[in-house]
Structures are given as structure tokens and as C-alpha cells.
Image (tube, rainbow, N blue to C red):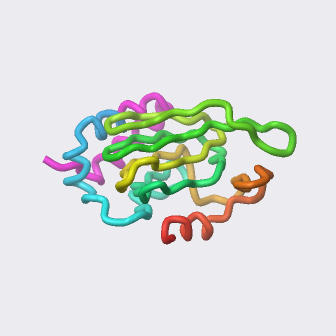
Amino acid sequence: MKLDVESFVDDVRRAKLEGQAAVDEVLARAVSDPRRVLAGIGEPRKAGFDVLHHGDDVTILNVIWAPQMMLLPHNHNMWASIGIYTGREDNIIWEREGSTVAARRAASLSEKEVFPLGEDWIHSVINPIPRLTGAIHIYGGDYFAPGRSEWDAETLVERPFDVESFRATFDA
């Protein structure tokens, strides 16, 4: 059996009307059977992300992290939920501290795990293992809308989120 992406998207959109916890339940059911997810969306072949759904109400991405890939601290300005179906994803949770950010806690996510991020959270992502990691990321709105921020890796100073730089990170 394989994950039916259209049905999954429909289930997420319905659950979103009840809130993030309901979306997390749908996501947890999906990633609880990684073979089913892999059969439905394919085995990860290279770093990148596929848009499974993009709308004002919700955005669903299939994110493939390259080995040891890192994404700068950034915010979403909306809640998000991450579900791992292969590999591992480490998240560092940051908090604003004056004009910069400071790391406050971390979460290591493995296969079959779901991790909710709050609306005002700032996080960075690392794939710490030597193989591709696959994750479904669900956002409670339009992920590609302007107005988000990222923080410089060296200075930790806030700047506008650059979608093209985001895409280039996956290409590199």
C-alpha cells in the first residue's frame, strides 16, 4: 500500500480547521509507516523539496535533506509540523535576544516522529547523518509569502528570508 498524496492533502486541510494538534495526528499516521510514504512519494534521490500542496490555508512540502546539510535559523510566522519518514533531522530552537538570537534547546527527530513548531518559533535544521533524510513539513499558511526572517550564520543578525537562497542551499 502507498500513501495517496491527494487524500493526505485533503485530510490535512480538513484537520487544519480543527488546529495544529489535529494536523499533527494526520501527519503522525502518515509517517508511522515509512514504507507507505516512500511508495507514495518516492525514495529520496537528491536534496530538494517538492511542493505537495501550496495554498493560503496550508503548505505541504516533501523536504529532502542532503547529508550534513544545514539551514540557517529562520522563522515561519505560522505554526509548522515536521514528520520524518526516513533518516534524521536535528532542530535547534532559537529565541530573540536583543538584535540577535540565542540557541535555547534542541530536538533530534528520527523516523516516525512528528515535531510541532509554534507560530513564533525560530529554528535551524541539520541533517546530521551521512545519507539523505526525508521529511514532510506542513505549514499553517502560505510558506512562500513574504515577511519571514532568517539569521546570519556568523553574526546571528536578522535579515529578510531569501527564498532563492533557500532553494540554492538545496541545490548546493
Looking at this view, name the residue that lies furthest to the left.
1
Q: How many marks?
A: 0
Q: Which residues are magenta?
A: 1-25
Which residue is drawn at the image coordinates 29% and 53% (left, top)? Answer: 5
x, y percent for residue 66: 43, 59
Judge whether residue 156 can be spotted in this image: yes
Q: 24 above or below 150?
A: above
Q: Closer to the camera, 71 or 83?
A: 71
Main SS category, magenta section? helix
- Image-based side of 47 in relation to 162, left or right: left
- Image-based side of 78 in relation to 31, left or right: right
Looking at this view, name the residue that lies furthest to the front.
130
Q: Residue 105's quadrant in the figure?
A: top right
Looking at this view, name the residue that lies furthest to the right.
98
Which residue is drawn at the image coordinates 32% and 36% (left, top)? Answer: 112
Q: 102 above or below 60?
A: above
x, y percent for residue 142: 57, 54
x, y percent for residue 39: 19, 54
Q: Closer to the camera, 120 or 68?
A: 68
Q: Residue 51's quadrant in the figure?
A: bottom left
Which residue is drawn at the image coordinates 50% and 57% (left, top)? Answer: 69
x, y percent for residue 92: 59, 39
Is 145 one of the magenta-colored residues? no
Which residue is drawn at the image coordinates 69% and 59% (left, top)? Answer: 161
Judge whether residue 149 can be spotted in this image: no
